[in-house]
């Protein structure tokens, strides 16, 4: 099922609630549906920024917030980007999402 888009002027909490109810069945890791919906809301909000400096800073903050989290996967084993592994969960705006950390190469 495609991820729903925020509707014009929709408040973040209302959008995320609506989005999670639409996509929760596709994600079996606690909090991953929230991360997907939150990232979609943040991307939509970023797309409306017109000032170049503000857009760059928003993109940097977005990339740091969702660094390592595979927002397309279902399941903890596929929850992170290649080169990252899920070590438990972390708090993202009051919700638990996969804690994706870089894989340490053994010496």
Image (cartoon, helix red, strand yellow):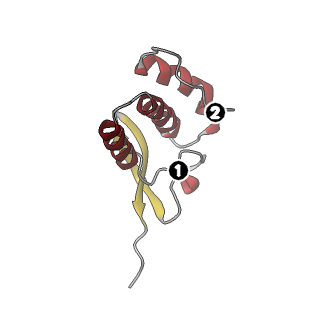
Q: Earlier in the sequence, mark 1 or mark 2?
A: 2
Q: Name above or below for residue 40 compared with residue 12.
A: below
Q: Count all numbered tags in the image, as a single digit.
A: 2
Which residue is drawn at the image coordinates 53% and 50% (left, top)? 70
In the foreground, 44 or 88? 44
Determine whether 69 is above or below 91 in the image: below
Asked if residue 102 is positioned above or below residue 93 in the image, the reply reads: below
For marks 1 and 2, give the one nearer the viewer: 1
> Which residue reaches farthest top?
9
**In terms of image quadrants, where is residue 107?**
bottom left
Q: Position of residue 17 (x, y in %)?
A: 49, 21
- What residue do we see at 43% from left, 27% from top? 48
Relative to 75, 104 lies left or right: left
Numbered disc 1: secondary structure: loop
Does residue 68 lie above or below 1 as drawn? Answer: below
Are there few (<14), some (14-19), or many (20+) residues within 10 Å of tag 2? Answer: few
Q: Quadrant of the N terminus?
A: top right
Seen from the viewer's position, the closer of residues 18 and 62 is 62
Image location (x, y in percent) of residue 100: 43, 55
At which x and y percent is residue 50?
Answer: 38, 30
Q: Give the residue at x 36% y 45%.
A: 65
Quadrant in which residue 91 is drawn: top left
Q: Label for residue 61? A: none
* Mark 1 Cα-neighbour bin, 10 Å: few <14, some 14–19, many ≥20: many
Task: Provide residue 104's location: percent of width, then percent of height.
Answer: 40, 72
Secondary structure under the numbered disc 2 in the rendered image: helix
Q: Which mark is residue 25?
A: 2
Q: Which residue is mark 1?
A: 70
Query: Furthest residue to the right?
Result: 1
Distance from Cα at disc 1 to Cα at disc 2:
17 Å
């Amino acid at each position: 099922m495609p991820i729903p888009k925020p509707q014009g002027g929709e408040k973040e909490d209302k959008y995320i609630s609506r989005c999670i109810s639409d996509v929760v069945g596709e994600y079996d890791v606690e909090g991953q549906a929230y991360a997907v919906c939150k990232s979609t809301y943040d991307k939509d909000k970023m797309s409306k920024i017109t000032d170049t400096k503000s857009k760059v800073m928003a993109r940097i903050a977005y990339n740091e917030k969702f660094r390592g989290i595979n927002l397309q996967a279902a399941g903890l084993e596929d929850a992170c980007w290649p080169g990252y592994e899920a070590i438990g969960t972390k708090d993202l705006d009051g919700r638990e999402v996969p804690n994706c950390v870089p894989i340490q190469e053994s010496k």
